[in-house]
């Protein structure tokens, strides 16, 4: 596995729309493994492929250590409720902002074997699913933040 370079700040790649994965290949699986390693080394709870310069609809999430979600072509198919809280992003180091998200989402995605699954998330997991899926459409949390926080807050 290899650690990938995470794009930051005003890198234009972060603002592009990622394309669906049409064929899951050995390269896709290596990319997913590398994304998981990169997320962990950066002490993040989620990472989207465009953050490492790959404009494909792939996301990894690990809000509970050891419980990794590998999402290929993910879509939110249901959501409800509301939660408002602080959010950060590995691509915007040193920043945090307050974002309102659904308190529950259901995500449909393919796994690395091409099998479709539906995953439910509440609280932090729901927030993380929403945040990472936004990256696939070039959306950053700062676009949705009601206010930004000072680093010491
Ligand atoms: Zn992010």
Image (cartoon, rainbow, N blue to C red):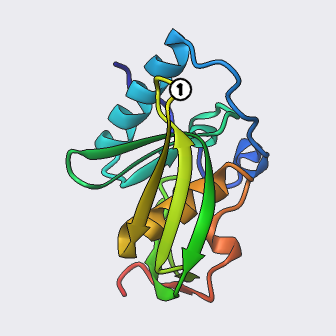
Measured from the top left, where is residue 113 in percent x and y? 46, 23
Residue 19, image quadrant? top right
The one of 98 and 129 positioned closer to us in this rendering? 129
Residue positioned 38% across, 26% down in the render: 33
Q: Is mark 1 within 8 Å of ligand 1?
A: no
The number of discs equals 1
- Secondary structure found at label 1: loop
Measured from the top left, where is residue 18 in percent x and y? 74, 40
Q: Which residue is mark 1?
A: 114
Relative to 67, 19 lies left or right: right
- On screen, 115 above or below 121? above
Residue positioned 67% across, 77% down in the render: 144
The one of 72 and 147 positioned closer to us in this rendering? 72
Farthest left residue in view: 66
- On screen, 135 above or below 122? above
Residue 98 appears in view: yes
Measured from the top left, where is residue 66 in percent x and y? 20, 45
Residue 95 appears in view: no
Relative to 131, 46 lies left or right: left
The one of 38 and 25 positioned closer to us in this rendering? 25
Residue positioned 57% across, 74% down in the render: 79
């Amino acid at each position: 596995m290899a650690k990938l370079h995470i794009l930051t700040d005003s890198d234009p790649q972060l603002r592009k729309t990622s394309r669906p994965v049409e064929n899951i290949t050995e390269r896709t699986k290596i990319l997913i493994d590398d994304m998981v390693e990169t997320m962990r080394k950066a002490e993040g709870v989620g990472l989207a492929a465009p953050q490492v310069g790959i404009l494909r609809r792939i996301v990894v999430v690990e809000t509970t250590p050891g419980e990794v979600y590998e999402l290929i072509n993910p879509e939110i198919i249901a959501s409800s409720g509301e939660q408002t809280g602080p959010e950060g992003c590995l691509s915007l180091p040193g920043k945090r902002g307050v974002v309102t998200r659904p308190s529950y989402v259901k995500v449909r995605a393919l796994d690395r074997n091409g099998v479709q699954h539906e995953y439910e998330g509440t609280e932090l997991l729901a927030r993380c699913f929403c945040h990472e899926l936004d990256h696939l459409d070039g959306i950053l949390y700062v676009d949705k933040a009601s206010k930004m926080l000072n680093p010491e807050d």
